Amino acid sequence: MKSDLGKYRDELIISSKAGYDMWDGPYGEWGSKKHVIASCDQSLKRMKLDYVDIFYSHRFDPNTPLEETADALESIYKAGKALYIGVSSYSSNKTNKMISILKGKGIKLLIHQPSYSLINRWIEKDLTKTLIKKGVGCIAFSPLAQGFLSDKYLKGIPKVSRVNENSSFSKDLITKKNTKIINELNKIAKRRNQSLSQMAIAWVLNNRAITSALIGARTVKQLKENLAALDNLNFSKKEIKEINKTAKEGDINIWSPSSAH
């Protein structure tokens, strides 16, 4: 970080988060004040930074009062360790509560980071309405459904893939139903002169609640292909209707327990 990107620090938006496994042993996950603050401090130490631009509570903790998690975020913010505060995978209800608690501390919840894609559309139920109403940004992660919404899975599971690397993307998610869906979506993408991944990203950005999208490109080639999605962000009413008819919920949201409360 310091050697390669240090001189560009003021041009970069760097974020970090707390909530999932950070270390073995007590307080290594969830939303306690001890975990959240220690996670931030450890991240800053590893990156050799004085502050991050955005710090997220990465998942709601049903066993810790929301006020305690908010206290931790307040401490981080007021200590100058983060310029902005966000949450990730929180339900609409818990997002509203966190907005209210932080507002009482003089802090604006800047942004929400939910998973969102053509086959993972849980935020459309009520979260997007909440974010628009409250003026909170939304940066979608996994807009390609961990790579499933790309050309590589159209004919099954390739040898080189996240699935075969024992990652969080399980083979159980690659059902006949989902494979059929992505092949139908690929036909629509071709008519738009886009790859499936380009259309998937463009579609996510087409939602007016979405501020930006996080892409997990592994190579420069993938990065360039994903960025080319910006060349065609417009969808006709006919395309949207056809996509909505095709793009059904794929039951791939492995982060759903956090947003179920």
Image (spheres, helix red, strand yellow):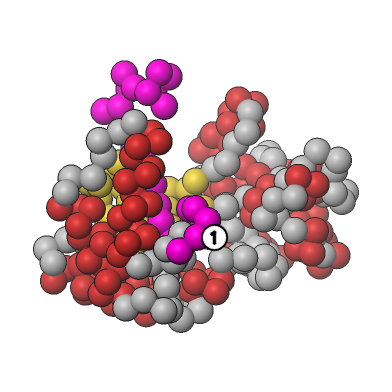
Give x and y (percent) for residue 20.
49, 59
Dot 1 falls on a residue whose secondary structure is: loop
In the picture shown, does residue 128 fall above or below 3? Answer: below
> Front-most of 195 and 119?
119
**Residue found at x 57% / y 52%:** 143
Is 175 on the left-hand or right-hand side of 114?
A: right
Q: Magenta stretch: residue 2 in it?
A: yes
> Front-most of 208 and 121?
121
> Front-most of 98 and 200?
98
Residue marked by disc 1: 116
Q: Magenta stretch: residue 23 in it?
A: yes
> Front-most of 197 and 30?
30
User: Quarter-wise, where is residue 128 in the image?
Assistant: bottom left
User: Quarter-wise, where is residue 75 in the image?
Assistant: bottom left
How many labels, in total? 1
Whether residue 191 is visible: no
User: Quarter-wise, where is residue 43 in the image?
Assistant: top left
Give x and y (percent) for residue 205.
48, 51
- The magenta segment: 1-26
